[in-house]
Image (spheres, rainbow, N blue to C red):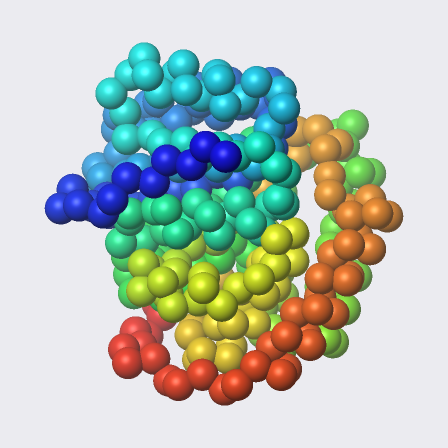
């Protein structure tokens, strides 16, 4: 296992952006290309953390080469076993140094403008801010050829969300959007209590927010469908349903947590 976690220091970043990464293929280079001007022009201090979750396609080597070539605030965590997206997200958020910590998909289905929008919600006072595809101001951008695919994904997402709301005390309509953020205080409070290693982490995080009385702000985004890569097939869906049931059992039997010492009103 290769994990690089520098100690916290006085140069703590203001924002951390975590990319859980598993065999991303060609999209990695395009995402890196977009990150370079983002870091150069960002008015705030950002750090980027890639978490290579058992990649076997040469991604760790490619990232190591790019990171070594430029003095950028980019770090990589890499380990041999594929542990799942939830594990990679938790690992990255724990290693992050930012006062505010965000995570999103490595293919940037949610653009860096959306990332900035979620970051601004956190800066404005939200303890947790999440992208919401069902927000009235959100937009979907999809080629004509993918309209049928996008509609099927929408129906699958709606069905999964309905079941999640039956099993868990969730208040948000869109639980699975792949862009979320939180304060360092929330991360340090909740992450040690989260156990989900798969795609159910989003639901477990939001369930924990309910149990701890942490308010969640929903942020409008623009979702871009560029290909048919999806986690909504039969086998992943069954795994996610199993995760929902385990989350329900775990948090139903968990002792009621004490109220946070400090709770900010979300914008």
Image-based side of 227 in relation to 20, left or right: right
Q: Residue furthest front?
A: 1
Viewport quadrant of the C terminus: bottom left
Residue nearest the viewer, comparing 209 with 220: 209
Q: Is residue 59 above or below residue 209?
A: above
What residue lies at 32% left-to-right and 16% top-to-bottom? 68
Residue 205 coordinates in the image, percent (x, y)? 53, 64
**Residue at screen point 80% across, 38% down:** 149
Determine the residue positioned at 72% across, 75% down: 167
Residue with the most extreme left position: 10
Looking at the image, residue 20 lies above or below residue 187: above
Q: Where 213 falls versus 219 (above or below)?
A: below
* 98 left or right, relative to 187: left
Find residue 163 and report its horizontal and vertical position in percent: 76, 69
From where the camera sits, is residue 127 visible?
yes
Tell me which corner region of the image, top left, top right, bottom left or bottom right, holds residue 34: top left
Q: Position of residue 197 (x, y in %)?
A: 61, 53
Would you say 87 lies left or right of 147 here?
Answer: left
Disc count in the image? 0
Q: Say whether residue 116 is visible.
A: no
Residue at image point 37% right, 35% down: 4
């Amino acid at each position: 296992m290769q994990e690089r976690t520098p100690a916290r220091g006085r140069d703590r970043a203001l924002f951390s952006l975590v990319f859980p990464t598993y065999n991303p293929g060609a999209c990695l280079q395009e995402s890196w290309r977009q990150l370079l001007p983002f870091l150069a022009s960002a008015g705030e201090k950002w750090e980027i953390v890639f978490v290579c979750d058992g990649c076997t396609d040469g991604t760790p080597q490619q990232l190591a080469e790019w990171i070594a070539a430029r003095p950028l605030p980019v770090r990589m965590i890499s380990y041999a076993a594929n542990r799942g997206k939830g594990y990679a997200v938790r690992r990255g958020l724990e290693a992050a140094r930012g006062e505010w910590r965000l995570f999103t998909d490595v293919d940037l289905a949610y653009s860096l403008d959306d990332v900035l929008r979620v970051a601004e919600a956190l800066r404005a006072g939200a303890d947790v801010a999440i992208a919401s595809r069902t927000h009235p101001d959100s937009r979907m951008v999809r080629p004509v050829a993918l309209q049928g695919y996008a509609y099927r994904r929408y129906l699958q997402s709606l069905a999964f969300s309905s079941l999640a709301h039956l099993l868990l005390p969730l208040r948000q309509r869109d639980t699975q959007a792949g862009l979320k953020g939180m304060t360092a205080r929330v991360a340090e409070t909740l992450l040690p209590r989260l156990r989900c290693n798969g795609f159910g982490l989003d639901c477990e995080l939001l369930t924990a927010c309910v149990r701890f009385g942490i308010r969640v702000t929903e942020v409008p985004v623009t979702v871009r469908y560029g290909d048919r890569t999806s986690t909504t097939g039969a086998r992943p869906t069954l795994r996610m349903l199993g995760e929902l049931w385990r989350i329900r059992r775990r948090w139903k039997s968990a002792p009621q947590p004490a109220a946070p010492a400090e709770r900010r009103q979300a914008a």
